[in-house]
Image: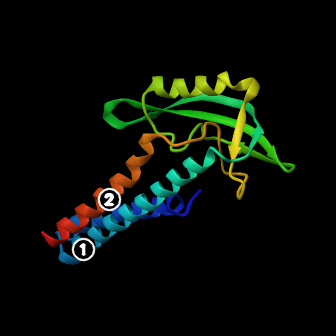
Amino acid sequence: MNFANKYSGVVICMFIASIFWFAISGGSALSKNCSLLMLFILGSFMIIGGIETITDSINSINWPTEKGVLKTALVVRHSSGTSGFIYKPAVVVEYEVGGVKHTCRDVRFADTLGTRSSAKLAIEQVKALKDDLKVYYNPVNSGFSVIIPGFTVSMALTPLVGVSAIIASIAIYFA
């Protein structure tokens, strides 16, 4: 897990707290500026995390592989509030590198929540590989792995949203 992804939850919580502070304080200039600063920092984390994910995904094509053993493969349903459900492929694949056992839980980089059919398709792709299931692992950190390596266009969404957050924070500050 990269730095930006590891700490983005803290930044998101700080951003939400600063919005509540802004609302409770009656919109004071200090609380507004803190909220905008948190939005700027959140955008920065999204850009850094997105670039790290894109870099890892591109490099993963050349990572070493080990044979994996599929333990679990299913579609997980998450509630998305009033709009229904969103779905994510959930896998558990065990593999061993240099006598150390690891678990891979990612079908591909930046597995996103989506439709049931897209999650089901990802699970079917993994199950189809069952006899020849390879896990691509980072040679520097063998516990960091993926089943289907490579870049997908949807990975560019995170840094783009980060840029939008930074632009919005600057525009609101100077408005």
Please, what is the three-letter code of the amino acid marked with disc 2? Val
Where, quadrant-wise, is the N terminus in this rendering? bottom right
Label 1: which secondary element: helix
Indicate the position of residue 131 as horizontal and vertical percent values. 76, 24
Q: Looking at the picture, how far across and down is residue 84, in whole percent?
A: 36, 29
Q: Which mark is residue 33?
A: 1
Q: Are marks 1 and 2 in contact (CB under 8 Å)?
A: no
The residue labelled by disc 2 is 163
Q: Residue at x 75, y 35 (%)?
A: 68
Quarter of the figure with the C terminus: bottom left
Image position of 20 (left or right of 153) = left
Q: Residue furthest right?
A: 99
Residue at 59%, 22% (x, y): give it: 124
- Is disc 2 placed on a helix, strand or loop? helix
Q: Please indicate whether residue 11 sits to the left or right of residue 96 in the image.
A: left
Along the viewing direction, whichever of 31 and 8 lies nearer the viewer: 8
The answer to which quarter of the image holds residue 125 is top right
Q: Amino acid at mark 1?
A: Asn
Along the line of sight, which residue is nearer the eye, 24 or 87? 87
- Picture residue at 53% right of the left edge, 54% below the top: 55
